[in-house]
Amino acid sequence: MHRLRCILLPLAMVTVVAARPVQEGRPRPFVCADYTQGRIFIVDVSGQILWDYPAENCNDLWVLPDGGLLFTTGHGVRELGPDRRVRFAYDSPSEIYACQRLADGNTFVGECNSGRLLEISPGGKVVKEVRLLPPGKDGGHAFMRNARRLANGHTLVAHYGLGVVREYDTAGAAVLEIPAPGGPHSVIRLPDGNTLVACADNNGVSARVFECDPGGKTVWELKAEDVPGTPLFFLGGLQRLPNGNTVLTNWLGHGHLGAGPVVVEVTRDKRVVWSFSDHEKIRTASSIQILDVAGDPARGEILH
């Protein structure tokens, strides 16, 4: 009996940690980019992957009104029609982390290394160029991440390596600068004129998303420590929903694979109301668009 007890006691002391459910809270269908696996995924409300497609180092994507998909591919941009055939393509020697369909049918592209902000016609011709760097200068891998062309022709740019968000006018002059320690990844200009920024966790800074008014004052902020039990690391893509909630992609690279949810939805009062954590299928989500929110992205109706 004594011998048997010696065998059983160590087993009783073993703590079994339950795996996090694939989804917690009210689930949503979505499209997301997995930067690490180099794929984009369409996921239904039950959490099942309906379709996926190769997209190397994808960091930005959009669902178009007809069901097409516009997304970055490391050194390019692709658009797939509803039949999933390529109907627009642009390639560059520069790394590319930002794309956007504009109301006139052109496509905005932000080139990272070259610092060029481009508008490209449906036929693939560059019809407008704004340079943030001198010709021939390489801004490097971290110069730019997400960027958004605004209705007034200005451009919001997340300067990841510089730790700032800047708004540039049509000539490329900076008219606004927002400090974003930790490395800004994604930026959104909200209808009320505020700016929403998602930041990484570089240099020991806590990952966070914050909203500031036109004067640069922070009016809302979510830090990793605000949601205990939901580990947040590198906050990449984001979307502001019509109900005021914010959806975040929690990029789990840099040694954090499987350590937290891949997608999180939080309320204005910082409650987590949905999370997605299928680490076997989606490892490092970098950009997301929720599919149960109606609107035309080219007209600014999707805040993503």
Image (cartoon, helix red, strand yellow):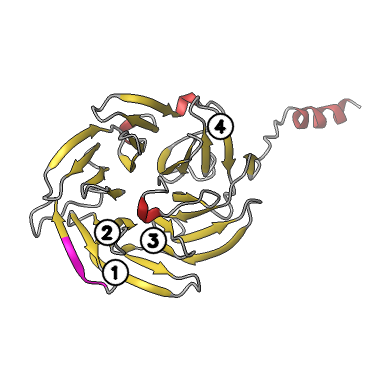
Residue hosting label 2: 109
Please state which of residues 124 and 60 is positioned toward the viewer in this rendering.
124
**What's drawn in magenta, residue-wise?**
124-128
Residue 32 appearing in the image: yes
Residue hosting label 1: 90
Query: Could you tell me which quadrant the N terminus lies in?
Result: top right
Residue visible at 86% across and 29% down in the picture: 3
Position of residue 141 measured from the top left corner of the image (x, y, whole percent): 25, 52
Q: CA distance from mark 3 to mark 4?
A: 28 Å
Q: Which amino acid is tagged 2? A: Val
Which type of secondary structure does the marked residue at label 2 adopt? Answer: strand
Residue 127 falls inside the magenta stretch: yes
In terms of sequence position, does the residue under pointer 2 or pointer 4 come before the other?
A: 2
Q: CA distance from mark 2 to mark 4?
A: 33 Å
Kindly identify which numbered label has been placed on residue 272. 4
Q: CA distance from mark 3 to mark 1?
A: 11 Å
In terms of sequence position, does the residue under pointer 3 or pointer 4 come before the other?
A: 3
Q: Which amino acid is tagged 4? A: Val
